[in-house]
Amino acid sequence: MGAQVAAQAVAAGATLRWLPQGRSAATRERAGDIGLRPAADLRELAGACEILLSVCPPAAALDVAAQVADAGFRGVYVDADAVGPERMAEITDVFEGGAVTVVDGGIAGPPPASPRGPGATSPGTTRPWRASATCSRAPLAPRSSCRGPSHGRPR
């Protein structure tokens, strides 16, 4: 799912980074094919990104959030995992007191179609089914879709 979501963002013009540590050769190859830029470690990734999208197995969501918080991330943390309200509250608490806006952006439904190959879609036309809500103390202002070079790009 994560690679397909990333491919849509790259096709729309975003620059994406990822953390290859501990990932398989197949995953590294997919990331390279999509055009993701590797980060040396989580601290580098956290410092370079203004939006961090977590797409991982639900059982790992809280641990991933804790690692991101420990790395000093400041920005918008979107948890796109299929977690319930109680787990989302725990994830939000991990970032308590930090300069982080936490968004519950759980993805539901099939992965988006690849921007290349059978079933290809144009950038900006794939809309994963999702339920999202801001979980931080301050509300997130409504925004248009994050397209183009100014969103999600390293600083």
Image: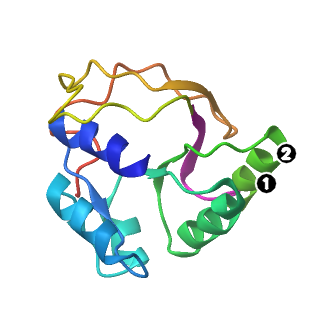
* Residue type at tag 1: Glu
> Circles 1 and 2: CB distance less than 8 Å?
yes
Instruction: Give the side of residue 20 with respect to residue 129, left or right.
Output: left
Q: Nearer the viewer, residue 83 or 95?
A: 83
Residue 51 visible to an observer of this rendering: no
Residue under pointer 1: 90
3 relative to 29, above or below: above
Q: Nearer the viewer, residue 42 or 136?
A: 42
Q: Which residues are magenta?
A: 95-107
Residue under pointer 2: 86
Q: Is residue 71 magenta?
A: no
| Residue depicted at 37% across the width and 76% down the height | 24
* Residue type at tag 2: Glu
Image quarter hosting the C terminus: bottom left
Q: Residues within 10 Å of mark 2 (few under 14, many from 20)?
A: few
106 relative to 43, above or below: above
